[in-house]
Image: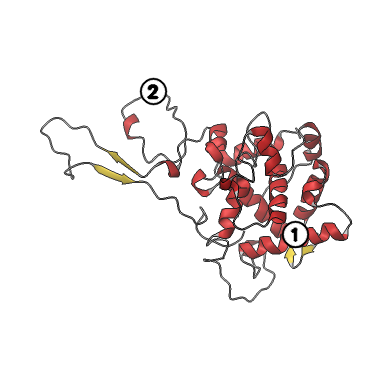
Amino acid sequence: MQPSSRRLFLKSAGATALATTASLPAAAEAAAAAHPTHGPQTAHAAAHGAPAATDPQAVYVFFNPQEARFIEAATARLIPSDEVGPGAIEAQVPRYLDRQLAGAWGAGERLYRSGPWQAGTPSQGYQLPYTPAELFRTALRGIAADLQRAGRPAFEHLPPLEQDRYLTELQEGRRELEGVPEAVFFETLWAMTVEGYFADPAYGGNTDMASWRMIGFPGAYANYYAWVDRHGMKVDLPPTSLAQHGRTIAIHPMPMGQPMPGAVGGMDHAMPAAAGTHPHGTGGAR
């Protein structure tokens, strides 16, 4: 497998609108050696011009400083920056995770919470009593304790290759993190990292729609009305975000003196407002 397999997978995942759990490739060590990733968000910001953690726009409302350092370092390893496109840090993926976990989705607003809490089959999905916020807080506390017991430095201070090995251990799920199965936490972290990388910037990640530009996705255009009669032309428009639009009005061109069928003025197309909830809307951990 080539070292760029992780990036190629992400391009494929975004192009097909899939955010399924994927394996950390075996070539991660070679990729890390060839493209070592910097540490927390502040270090990435200095190198790439992204907002630093001290920037008001990058202030966390859910993660405490210790948790934020792990999230920044872990997402930077899951989606590193390279010559193909930006990484998770440049796309502000940690900010996306922070906003979702601090909101209604993180609180399990639409998550079944009445038990019984029993091990389910793979087809039954998430079967733990934790809300997404509780899942992250408990698992992150467990990771810090696990590294401390082993006499190892905090995750963000590990060399890139060791970070990849530790993430692989989480994915393989041999232990529990204070009651949270490692594999469940890793799957949730990975899914949210991909979501934050490809979601509409209105939700906090995908800064400047960089991932959309990378895969050629146009974004949230309400319609292509102006292009209906333009045959044989390539539609090459820059991507657009929900956050960029309030209301868009499209008026059908009609001959002078001839009323528009079924209307008096024009068609009013209202763009959905950028909500503070999880973009998938259903709630519940994966």
Q: CA distance from mark 2 to mark 1?
A: 52 Å
**Picture residue at 64% right of the left edge, 30% below the top:** 84
Tell me the SS state at disc 2: loop
Q: Residues within 10 Å of mark 2 (few under 14, many from 20)?
A: few
Q: Earlier in the sequence, mark 2 or mark 1?
A: 1
Q: Which mark is residue 182?
A: 1
Residue 40: percent from the left, percent from the top? 71, 44
Q: Quadrant of residue 255?
A: top left
Pointer 2: what residue? 232
In this rendering, does residue 54 appear at all? yes
**Position of residue 128 in the picture relative to residue 204 (left or right):** right
**Picture residue at 88% right of the left edge, 58% below the top:** 150
Residue 135: percent from the left, percent from the top? 66, 63
Task: Report the front residue among 89 and 64.
Answer: 64
Outermost left residue: 257
Kind of residue at badge 1: Glu
**Position of residue 244 in the picture relative to residue 162 (left or right):** left
Of discs 2 and 1, which sits in the foreground?
Answer: 1
**Position of residue 5 in the picture relative to residue 285 (left or right):** right
**Picture residue at 71% right of the left edge, 33% below the top:** 4
Q: Quadrant of the C terminus?
A: bottom right
Tell me the SS state at disc 1: helix
Residue 89: percent from the left, percent from the top? 65, 41
Q: Residues within 10 Å of mark 1 (few under 14, many from 20)?
A: many
In this rendering, does residue 19 appear at all? no
Q: Which mark is residue 52?
A: none
